[in-house]
Amino acid sequence: MGVAEKSAQRTCIACRETKDKDQLLRYVVAPDGVVLVDYRQRLPGRGAYTCITPDCLQVAVKKNAFQRSFKGRCNAVDVTELQQRLDTAINQKITGLIGMARKSGQFTAGTNAVIESLRKGSSFALVIIAEDISVAIGKKIEALVEKNKIYGVRLYNKQAIGQMLGKEERSVIAIPAGLLADSLLKELHRHRQLVREN
Ligand SMILES: [Zn+2]
């Protein structure tokens, strides 16, 4: 049944806590023995799970928990490599969601348009500010983001944000409240937790 499947529980190989599958990261072993992050939890084969924290990743590697879980059929796991693979997976997810926002027109990009909307008290759920935005404009947008009680994050550079939107450089992108924004927020939180605060 769909409902039962959604609440399927798995145990973290590091801390042994049992949680909903979507609160955990899934890993599988590739034919060459490399441990892969199955970020979408769709790859076939035996899976191992960890919490979505740098701590549990590190403990799992230190305790040889991957080898034990995959019954020795995987190569040694390097925690830095694993984190890089995770970074790639999360970034792909974020890029994909921004691509969906682009296709459905659910975004506002560019400093002038975003600042104007924020001043009017927009219904944005989140704002992504390029890391290489000019200092003054970055501060201005961050102040407005705070005032509007919106989630704001410094991520990517102007070129990368522009590329996701099929445009030239863009210093800022804002996403209106809704399902797409909810998914994006979830991934941004994971990104912050795993990649930026490790
Ligand atoms: Zn854990």
Image (spheres, rainbow, N blue to C red):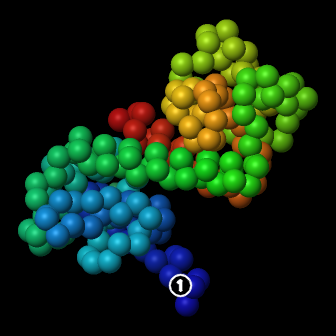
Quarter of the N terminus within the rendering: bottom right
Q: Is residue 3 above or below residue 9?
A: below
Examine the image and state in which quarter residue 150 appears: top right
Please name the residue shown 79% across and 22% down the image.
112
Answer left or right for 44 relative to 149: left
Quarter of the C terminus within the rendering: top left
Examine the image and state in which quarter residue 17 appears: bottom left
Q: Is residue 31 above or below residue 1?
A: above
Ligand 1 positioned in quadrant = bottom left
Please name the residue shown 57% across and 85% down the image.
2
Q: Residues within 10 Å of mark 1 (few under 14, many from 20)?
A: few
Q: Is residue 93 above or below residue 132?
A: below
Examine the image and state in which quarter residue 129 appears: top right
Residue position marked by numbered label 1 in the rendering: 4
Answer left or right for 119 relative to 27: right
Identify residue type, mark 1. Answer: Ala
> Which residue, as the protein is rendered here, is positioned at the far bottom?
1
